[in-house]
Image (tube, helix red, strand yellow):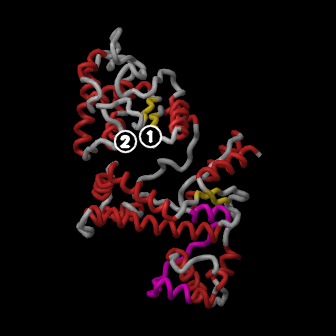
């Protein structure tokens, strides 16, 4: 099912304003204790229905549509007003909110109002319903997605660490990551919970298992990666065996250590120095599972993901970030945002070229990640989604 034509940021903001006005006019919405929850959910709902969800008001029960589950029932007035704004039913229905026999009641009901996919009136059951619906759709080989809006109490029921900690221009490093990990580990041990570390940098995971190395002043070498790698191979073959000639970060770090040792009159190899001066590991015996994709399939998924990001407003988001942070902090140089910055400054001429560059750079990043994982995590399990799921289930049952 194709997604409806999406809206620009200004159009979404205008729609959100209209939705807020409609909520204020709904009978009882101002007095049933739901006003804050409803109004605070408007921007997210308007964005979801305008940019993300593949749904059509003309065919609200289409089998190929995405499903939306409102677990935060207090936001029902916002959902109703959003559906009306996007044409699922006449706005006049909003003025009958909570009226006896009316379409729109306190809790959304499936088939009672167009656009409602799941009846959900009891706090805490929305996430379970959404997961069950997602599994059923997967078993039916459907490409439909499921989105669930949770309340704060449900989010708090499953603790997350390292989420929503910093703004884009705030500093973060591996030492701070260690602090977050220690808090998460303490919580898991105290409550008898399993601890999952997902996504993020392979370097951080390697540092957890191998220990943190000392910091060194950066030295401008004036050499290419190939020239530094040739130097590494001749002076420190142990280090060279662990990294590729394309690993700019680690080649630069080796050169920094090498320069430090030379200026200190020490003749040892950087790998020997690191072995003696690296701090003790923070974690041990971690089970590592890596999703492995066929190269062509991975490139196809990258292309599809890039297309979806543009459909969901990547350029608008990038534009707002570059305006808000003109100093261009490190996160704005990540793959995707960096290229968007070039496009917004006129350095990249067409959106087609922009999308192709993001796909290419993402594929290159994925290749570097695979190379790093292969050289650094010998005991990891690598397999397809199904194979990893089976192994993780087996691991947790032991």
**Left or right: where does residue 5 sit relative to residue 125?**
left
Horizontal and vertical percent for residue 253? 54, 77
Furthest-top residue in this view: 100
Please, what secondary structure does the residue beneath circle 2 have? loop
Residue at 51% x, 29% y is: 126
Q: Which residue lies at the image location 69% right of the left edge and 76% below the top edge? A: 275
Q: How many marks on residues?
A: 2
Which residue bears the numbered disc 1? 144
Residue 87, quarter of the rendered image: top left
Q: Quadrant of the N terminus?
A: top left
Q: Earlier in the sequence, mark 1 or mark 2?
A: 2
Q: Disc 1 on helix, strand or loop?
A: loop
Magenta includes 209?
Answer: yes
* Residue 236 versus residue 121 in the image, above or below: below
Which percent across, then down, holds residue 189? 71, 44
Camera-side residue: 257 or 28?
A: 28
Q: Position of residue 351 (x, y in %)?
A: 27, 61
Q: Quadrant of residue 106?
A: top left
Disc ID at residue 263: none
Q: Residue at x 58, y 62 (%)?
A: 204
Provide the residue span drawn in magenta. 202-230
Q: CA distance from mark 1 to mark 2?
A: 8 Å
- Answer whether labels 1 and 2 touch (C-beta < 8 Å): yes
Say which of 66 and 265 sits in front: 66
Give residue 165's position: percent from left, percent from top: 48, 50
Residue annotated with mark 2: 1
Residue lying furthest right in this view? 398
């Amino acid at each position: 099912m194709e997604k409806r034509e999406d809206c620009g940021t200004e159009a979404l903001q205008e729609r959100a304003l209209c939705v807020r006005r409609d909520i204020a006019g709904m009978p009882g919405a101002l007095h049933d204790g739901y006003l804050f929850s409803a109004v605070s959910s408007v921007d997210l709902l308007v964005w979801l229905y305008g940019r993300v969800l593949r749904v059509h008001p003309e065919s609200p029960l289409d089998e190929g549509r995405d499903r939306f589950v409102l677990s935060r029932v207090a936001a029902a007035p916002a959902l109703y007003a959003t559906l009306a704004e996007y044409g699922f039913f006449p706005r006049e229905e909003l003025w009958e909110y909570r009226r006896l026999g009316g379409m729109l009641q306190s809790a959304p009901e499936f088939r009672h109002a167009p656009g409602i996919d799941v009846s959900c009136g009891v706090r805490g059951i929305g996430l379970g319903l959404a997961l069950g619906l997602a599994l059923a759709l997967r078993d039916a080989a459907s490409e439909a997605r499921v989105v669930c809006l949770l309340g704060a109490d449900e989010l708090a029921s499953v603790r997350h660490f390292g989420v929503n900690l910093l703004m884009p221009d705030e500093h973060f490093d591996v030492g701070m990551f260690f602090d977050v990990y220690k808090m998460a580990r303490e919580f898991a041990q105290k409550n008898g919970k399993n601890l999952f570390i997902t996504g993020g940098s392979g370097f951080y995971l390697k540092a957890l298992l191998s220990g943190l190395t000392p910091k060194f002043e950066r030295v401008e070498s004036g050499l290419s990666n190939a020239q530094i790698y040739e130097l590494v191979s001749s002076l420190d073959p142990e280090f060279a065996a662990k990294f590729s000639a394309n690993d700019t970060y680690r080649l630069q770090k080796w050169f920094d250590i090498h320069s430090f040792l030379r200026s200190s009159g020490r003749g040892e190899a950087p790998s020997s120095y690191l072995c003696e001066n690296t701090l003790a590991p923070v974690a041990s015996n971690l089970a590592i599972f890596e999703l492995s994709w066929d190269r062509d399939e991975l490139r196809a998924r990258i292309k599809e993901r890039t297309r979806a990001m543009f459909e969901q407003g990547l350029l608008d988001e990038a534009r707002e970030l570059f305006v808000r942070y003109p100093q261009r902090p490190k996160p704005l140089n990540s793959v995707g945002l960096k290229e968007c910055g070039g496009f917004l400054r006129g350095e990249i001429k067409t959106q087609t070229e922009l999308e192709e560059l993001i796909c290419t750079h993402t594929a290159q990043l994925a290749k570097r990640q695979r190379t790093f994982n292969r050289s650094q995590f010998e005991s990891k399990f690598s397999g397809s989604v199904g194979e990893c799921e089976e192994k993780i289930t087996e691991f947790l049952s032991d």
